[in-house]
Image (spheres, coloured by chain):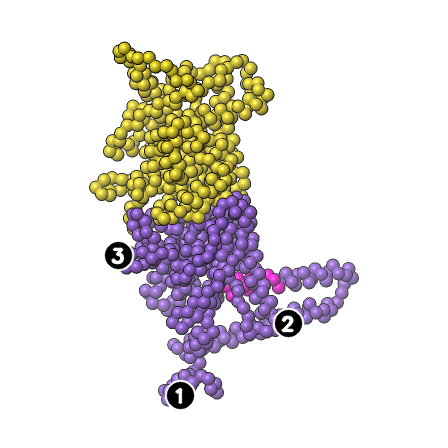
């Protein structure tokens, strides 16, 4: 990624270790008589991961003008959103919700990531926005269906191309009052189908007090409507997970500011927005929660986002398809084992 | 010329002038007389604010008029708002400054643009404006016209979100539904989330789209040719600055050693009345200090007259229709009571016209006298 060259080198993120297979009885321990070298398997996996690379698909949803593309560019420190490719800001608002995806391969520390950003122009921009989430819901399910078809093929690809949406960033307008009806409708319909991470867009319009109040209000409303965003409580695997995730849940929704411009401040080059009354520093945790979002989404939970998508959302879809088909496989009746299939890292149970 | 015993001060002027110029009549004092009567009577002004919730409308109104009109407001949460329709609420406050009284009425439109389906969400608003026109029309044609209550909306501040890239469909539809009924002044709200470049781009875009869609927003009247150059320059700058990018605040902060209305951020302090921060001062000056009267005039002379003409036309065409459908035989126009009212209205119309012409003549004479 171009931008990472101009920023001081950061600690390289380690690829996440795959989830422990659940429902396995703890093995009996045997005393080691010498060094065997089992622990090197981690290094082997890491090497393999680096060779095969990652796929990550992120969808952005929100009204036009909430800074979606800028935020994604800022998150991945690259011009990866739709706006960077032949798209001008003067494009008209489409009459219906469109789904537009753009892929880029970005590399960092020897690790390659094929990042696909899926934009949803037209969402919430019309006068009548009834059911404007339907094209989005349809798209997400279509990706599940695609994957399902590949999975049940007799001659399967070694690595099924994964176009499923791993994460959906939902942009909340910073009114400072409460969620809009449309926000609730969208999240109600989609929080059980995809990982939703709500963010408060363009939060440099809120003072610290207004931010705190607004976040509390939003959290209360989400709870009252029974909407569960990522990370979902029911998928916390152990106490450590729960403790980490609780902290994140209490800080959500993250109030973010995005920028692709650099300014000089305190002797450093920083990403920010320059106004007549000061410079809003995107990566300064006192100014906004962008770094929290980035650390959470990319540095600690990237793999988990994919796993929850695969192990839970996709499996839910698959189970429903099976049930709809009367227990028979929708595509072929040849037996296939149901197992969790870790996409990018070789599964320990394979 | 007989002098009313009440106008002592004017009598004085008359007597002093008598020594200087025997041709001097004395009605040059008319503006002063009007001024004194108005001050005694007080002014009234009805301002409407419209736009989605959360754009800072109430805060701006409080900042403009240095009041807190919304102290006891309860904001609904999303669940409660599911079945909310657009409401019209009115707050009236009496403001007095240097002996001049203003009865200010703020008409708010909670719920506008907040639903998932906002089809025709401007309907309650246009209905409200029409109702005020209708009430005034009836009162004006009535018998006791001494104390007509003028509830007509003199100005509508329309709040455009700063987050978009220009006008949204709902903005265009709203303004088109209202631009021939009320003076619309579009504003870019919460402008402190935009950099100066972004503000400029958005203003250009909005001005462009307003022209493209044929929206008739309130136009500042042209400067008189005999105004000072400085004034003309200020006027020009004002016009090029539209739509105004505004910020409001209910809180006072300490900035540059002074206590000012502003917003405190970790990266700096936004001052509402700092002209390099936003156009709040320009809006206030324009709305209150220079164009309040013109806004009322345009409402009376243009929007209300349009409504009235339209109303009368409808009435007469309906009459014509009724006459035709009531009987298939060709009838002589009988002097029915309805036709009589129409004749009265026509008479009054012509009387008004004559009075207006007289006033114009007087004004011209005064003008010539000055020169």
Specify the subunit that label 3 lies on. B
What residue is rendered at 28% in x and 27% in y?
Answer: A12
Mark 3, mark 1: which one is toward the viewer?
A: 3
The segment highlighted magenta reads B298-312
> Which mark, by number, is residue B15?
1
Res A145 seen here: no
Task: Give the colour of chain A.
Answer: yellow
The percent coordinates of residue B63 (x first, y second) are 39, 59
> Do marks 1 and 2 share a subunit?
yes
Residue occupying image coordinates x 54% and y 68%:
B149
Q: CA distance from mark 3 to mark 1?
A: 55 Å
Residue placed most toward the observer, A160 or B30: A160
Single out the residue that lies furthest toward the top: A33
Q: Residues within 10 Å of mark 3 (few under 14, many from 20)?
A: few
| Depth order, front residue of B85/A229 | A229
Comes first in the chain, label 1 or label 2: 1
- The quadrant in which the C terminus of chain B is found is bottom left
Foreground pick, B238 / A238? A238
Q: Do dots 3 and 1 share one subunit?
A: yes
Residue that numbered label 3 is attached to: B256
Res. B339 image quadrant: bottom right
Q: Is residue A181 left or right of residue A286?
A: right
Question: Which chain is home to disc 1?
Answer: B
Q: What letter labels the chain drawn in purple?
A: B
* Outermost residue, bottom side: B19
Q: Is residue B299 magenta?
A: yes
């Amino acid at each position: 990624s171009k931008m990472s060259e101009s920023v001081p080198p950061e600690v390289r993120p380690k690829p996440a270790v795959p989830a422990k297979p659940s429902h396995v009885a703890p093995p009996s321990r045997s005393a080691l008589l010498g060094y065997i070298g089992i622990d090197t398997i981690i290094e082997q996996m890491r090497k393999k991961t680096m060779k095969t690379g990652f796929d990550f698909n992120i969808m952005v949803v929100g009204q036009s003008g909430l800074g979606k593309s800028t935020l994604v560019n800022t998150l991945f420190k690259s011009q990866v959103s739709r706006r960077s490719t032949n798209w001008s800001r003067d494009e008209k608002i489409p009459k219906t919700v469109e789904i537009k995806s753009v892929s880029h391969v970005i590399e960092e520390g020897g690790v390659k990531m094929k990042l696909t950003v899926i934009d949803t122009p037209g969402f919430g921009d019309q006068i009548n926005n009834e059911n404007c989430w339907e094209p989005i819901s349809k798209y997400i399910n279509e990706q599940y269906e695609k994957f399902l078809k590949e999975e049940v093929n007799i001659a399967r690809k070694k690595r099924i191309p994964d176009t499923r949406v791993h994460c959906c960033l939902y942009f909340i307008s910073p009114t400072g009052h409460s969620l809009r009806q449309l926000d609730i409708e969208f999240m109600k319909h989609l929080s059980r189908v995809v990982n939703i991470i709500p963010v408060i867009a363009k939060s440099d319009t809120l003072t610290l007090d207004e931010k705190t109040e607004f976040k509390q209000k939003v959290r209360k409303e989400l709870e009252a409507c029974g909407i569960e965003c990522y990370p979902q409580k029911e998928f916390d695997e152990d106490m450590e997970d729960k403790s980490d995730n609780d902290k994140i849940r209490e800080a959500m929704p993250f109030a973010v500011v995005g920028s692709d411009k650099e300014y000089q401040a305190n002797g450093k080059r920083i990403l920010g927005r320059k106004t007549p009354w000061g410079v809003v520093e995107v990566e300064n945790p006192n100014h906004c929660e962008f770094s929290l979002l980035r650390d959470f989404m990319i540095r600690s939970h990237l793999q988990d986002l994919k796993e929850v998508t695969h192990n839970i959302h996709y499996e839910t879809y698959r189970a429903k398809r099976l049930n709809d088909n009367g227990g028979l496989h929708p595509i072929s009746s040849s037996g296939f084992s149901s197992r969790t299939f870790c996409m990018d890292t070789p599964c320990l149970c394979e | 010329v007989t002098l009313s015993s009440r106008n002592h001060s004017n009598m004085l002027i008359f007597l002093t002038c008598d020594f200087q110029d025997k041709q001097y009549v004395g009605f040059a004092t008319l503006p002063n007389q009007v001024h004194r009567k108005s001050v005694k009577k007080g002014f009234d002004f009805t301002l409407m604010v419209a736009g989605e919730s959360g754009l800072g409308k109430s805060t701006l109104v409080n900042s403009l008029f240095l009041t807190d009109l919304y102290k006891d407001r309860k904001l609904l949460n999303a669940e409660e708002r599911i079945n909310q329709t657009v409401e019209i609420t009115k707050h009236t406050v009496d403001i007095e400054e240097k002996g001049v009284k203003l009865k200010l009425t703020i008409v708010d439109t909670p719920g506008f643009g907040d639903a998932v389906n906002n089809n025709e969400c401007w309907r309650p608003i246009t209905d409200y404006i029409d109702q005020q026109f209708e009430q005034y029309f009836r009162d004006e044609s009535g018998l006791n016209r001494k104390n007509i209550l003028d509830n007509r909306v003199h100005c509508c501040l329309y709040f455009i979100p700063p987050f978009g890239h220009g006008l949204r469909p709902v903005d265009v539809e709203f303004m088109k539904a209202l631009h021939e009924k009320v003076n619309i002044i579009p504003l870019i709200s919460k402008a402190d989330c935009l950099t100066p470049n972004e503000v400029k781009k958005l203003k250009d875009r909005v001005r462009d789209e307003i022209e493209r869609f044929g929206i008739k927003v309130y136009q500042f009247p042209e400067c008189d040719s005999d105004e000072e150059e400085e004034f003309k320059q200020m006027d020009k700058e004002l016009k090029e600055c539209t739509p105004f990018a505004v910020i409001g605040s209910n809180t006072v902060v300490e900035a540059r050693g002074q206590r000012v209305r502003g917003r405190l951020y970790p990266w700096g302090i936004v001052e509402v009345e700092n002209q390099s921060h936003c156009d709040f001062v320009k809006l206030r000056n324009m709305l209150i200090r220079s164009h309040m009267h013109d806004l009322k005039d345009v409402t009376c002379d243009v929007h209300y007259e349009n409504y009235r003409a339209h109303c009368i036309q409808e009435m007469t065409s309906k009459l014509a229709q009724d006459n035709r459908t009531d009987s298939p035989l060709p009838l002589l126009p009988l002097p029915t009571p309805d036709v009589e009212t129409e004749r009265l209205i026509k008479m009054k119309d012509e009387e008004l016209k004559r009075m207006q012409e007289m006033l114009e003549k007087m004004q011209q004479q005064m003008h010539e006298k000055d020169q």
